[in-house]
Image (spheres, rainbow, N blue to C red):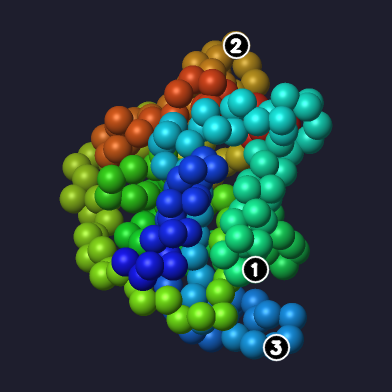
Amino acid sequence: MDPDLASLNTDAEACGLAYRGCFHPEIEDVVPAFADGAAVETLVLFGFVGARQWPHFARSAEMADALPDPLDRWSRRMIDALGIRHGGSALYPTQGPPWLPFQRWAMRAEPVYRSPLGVSIHPDYGLWHAYRGALAFRRRFVLPPRDPRPSPCESCVGKPCLQTCPVSAIRPDQYLVGTCAEHVGSSAGAGCLRFGCMARRACPVGVEFRYHPEQAHFHMTAFMRRR
């Protein structure tokens, strides 16, 4: 790994973020140029994998202050600080509209693919991961080898994620947000609210990375608040 990238990786882990890959942007990646018009040479992504980084956020000032969007604010504080230390410019999935194409960037950075649920799936982490932001650099880092593994959904028998939702809100070509939210907000949906989406939990990939109940409840509560 490029020495500067290795140092960035180490600092990210220390503050509670996982390195989520990097790539050299092309025009079709729609990575914003720097303020002076210079093109971004390397984009590095950061986020969560499973529950590993959750304790860093859970004990943060943002989590405790009862103000809106604690995870977004914490992510910005952490990634902004990394950018200052390492000379990168921060970009965020909540930055918009227009919204930055983080799902496309993720697919360029590491082996993630669109799952039948619409959530990106990783061969190791399954559906239990997230992208919190990115740093854009003027320097062209030496990239590690690309992970060639295919989508685990290609070899998945039965697609249990599509068979498990108790109200059939998850379909091969559609996600019925209102139906899902109505169920989660009812007494029958208490399990989804507390432990996370039942269809997501049915995925056999990355079971050991499933979110802890506190983490799952945080995200489900945020979903109900914003729907």
Q: Secondary structure at mark 1?
A: strand
Q: Are marks 2 and 1 in contact (CB under 8 Å)?
A: no
Quarter-of-image position of residue 35: bottom right
Counting other residues with Cα less than 10 Å from the Cα at mark 2, is it few (<14), some (14-19), or many (20 or more)? few
User: Which is nearer the N-term, disc 2 or disc 1?
Assistant: 1
Q: Which residue is mark 1?
A: 89
Residue depicted at x 27% and y 49%: 123
Residue depicted at x 50% and y 16%: 191
| In the depicted structure, whether residue 118 falls above or below residue 191 | below
Residue in front for this viewpoint, 57 or 197? 57
Distance from the alpha carbon under mark 1 to that under mark 3: 13 Å
Residue depicted at x 63% and y 48%: 78
Mark seen at residue 37: 3
Residue depicted at x 68% and y 50%: 76
* Quadrant containing the C terminus in the rendered view: top right
Residue 220, percent from left and from top: 59, 29
Q: Secondary structure at mark 2?
A: helix
Counting other residues with Cα less than 10 Å from the Cα at mark 1, is it few (<14), some (14-19), or many (20 or more)? some
User: Which is nearer the N-term, disc 1 or disc 3?
Assistant: 3
* Quadrant containing the N terminus in the rendered view: bottom left
Distance from the alpha carbon under mark 2 to that under mark 3: 53 Å
Q: Amino acid at mark 3?
A: Gly
Q: Amino acid at mark 1?
A: Ser
